[in-house]
Amino acid sequence: MFDPYPSGLPVGPGWVSTPDTEEITFPYDGSVVSEAPIGTPELARRAVDEAVGLAREVAALPSWARRDILLNVHRALTEWQSEFEGLLVAETGKPLCDCRVEVARTLVTWQAAAEEVARLHGETVPLDLLPFGEGLTGFWKRKPIGVVVGIAGFNYPLLLASHKIAPAIAAGCPVIVKPAPQTPLATLWLVHLVREATALPAMVQLVTGDAEVGSALVTDRRVGAVSFTGSASTGHRIAKDAAPTKTLLELGSNAALVVAEDADLDAAADAVLRGAFYASGQACISVQRLIVVDSVADALTERVLARLGEVVVGDPRDEATRVSALIDERSTARVLAWIGEAVAAGAKVLAGGEVADGVIPPTVLADVPDGVACWDEEIFGPVVCLRRVSDVDEAFAQVNASRYGLHASVFTRSLGIAFRAIDELEVGGVVVNEVPGFRSDTMPYGGVKDSGVGREGPRFAIDELTVTRMAVIRA
């Protein structure tokens, strides 16, 4: 049993016991990893009470103190790096190689947030552009938005929680985090390390639980901002319930990879193998729609299928594994149902498509029509849908026809096509000659349309979690 922190939930300055717990199991074989406390709406409201009561004190923390907290957490995470990697494999079922990447990215996030503290400042404003402004001095500064609620997804629980907690601390905001019910353990440990790094432990709290717990948090009018990572449907509901509270939404996608006729096909095929199946396809910017200009479609398809065996399927604890079991049986059943729906609508299975020993292997579908979930929605599994188009114009139109717009990538040797993609694709990020799943944790990350609103990455999240305070002084 995994138990590196006190029992109960970190609410207020201490840890509060809960009447109920639930088993967290290893998705690959169903073995028990640990038991996790189950929170309640009452505990959620208590956490908000505690955060509101501490908000002024947290906002008054000097820059050096906020930076020290962030750097101390970075050091603690570094010390326990390998243990976090193992825990993430156990509770998410994600391959070890992907869990190592998650922890490495988490370290960058905390380091970057610490560095941004020194850049959290405003500017002077020229007020004397008209005569009535003569003699006035003007400047603006950034002030904390108040209590932050951060709700994270199951697929990258440590990293996603860090993208809520670290910017909130940097901005001077108390934060309450709610992890996904399937994966609370790494986040509980992270919050424990944060609370050990500060004299104000209640500035970071955690409440587990179901949708009622989440509702108690996001509907409390005393909350300054809600930051959510998860599905579009849940995000829409949170935005509606939280209004008029500010919401930052990092939602789903069905990311496209476009292959132009002048593309390096070996590089494009490699990108499909890397970009479609990492984290067992449970990533919002994994390659789902492969849109290929017809003149090179046969050659690319041949390359992808010839190398598909390189994507090792099996136990996620094995360093060679790239695809393993999805987070739970319900997710596996849903992905299989979506594949079946696509086939019934005329799609062809070029590889995979069935479950073996509880794992869906890398699956490639061709001729998936519009109107089926495999193409229109976010599949969140190791499935890529290949579609032929006549030219790049049609490819870009196909990308933009989606209700989502998080990331897209284009493989081409043409600077003209590359810059057209940057200008024309309706997404939050355009990646040229690399997987759409590329994300540096210091860049502005987020989407348009149903992929969300707002941007993550410490610098940009801190902007979202602060408000502009204008000052005008007559000497």
Image (tube, rainbow, N blue to C red):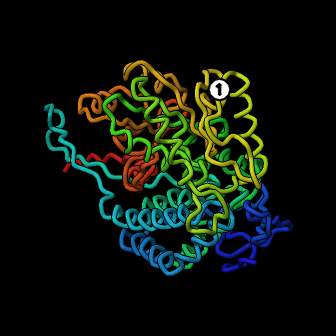
Where 466 sits versus 115, above or below? above
**Residue 336 drawn at (x, y percent):** 74, 39
Where 59 sits versus 233, above or below? below
**Residue 397 drawn at (x, y percent):** 44, 20
**Residue 232 drawn at (x, y percent):** 62, 37
Looking at the picture, which amino acid does disc 1 mark? Ala
Q: In this orientation, which residue lies closer to the viewer: 64 or 393?
A: 393
Q: In the picture, residue 296 is in which quadrant?
A: top left
Is any atom of residue 52 visible in this view?
no
Q: How many marks?
A: 1
Label 1: how many residues lie within 10 Å, few (<14), some (14-19) or many (20+)?
many
Q: In the picture, residue 313 is in which quadrant?
A: bottom right
Q: What residue lies at 37% left-to-right and 63% top-to-bottom? A: 112
Q: In the picture, residue 82 is in which quadrant?
A: bottom right
Q: Is residue 33 left or right of residue 434?
A: right
Q: In this orientation, which residue lies closer to the viewer: 181 or 101?
A: 101
Q: Quadrant of the N terminus?
A: bottom right
Mark 1: which secondary structure?
loop
Q: What residue lies at 62% left-to-right and 42% top-to-bottom? A: 363
Q: Is residue 189 left or right of residue 136?
A: right
Q: In this orientation, which residue lies closer to the viewer: 5 or 388?
A: 388
Q: Is residue 94 left or right of residue 197?
A: right
Q: In this orientation, which residue lies closer to the viewer: 5 or 168?
A: 5
Q: What residue lies at 64% left-to-right and 64% top-to-bottom? A: 316
Q: What residue lies at 51% left-to-right and 67% top-to-bottom? A: 100
Is any atom of residue 177 visible in this view?
yes
Q: Is residue 352 left or right of residue 406?
A: right
**Residue 290 drawn at (x, y percent):** 49, 33
Residue holding disc 1 = 347
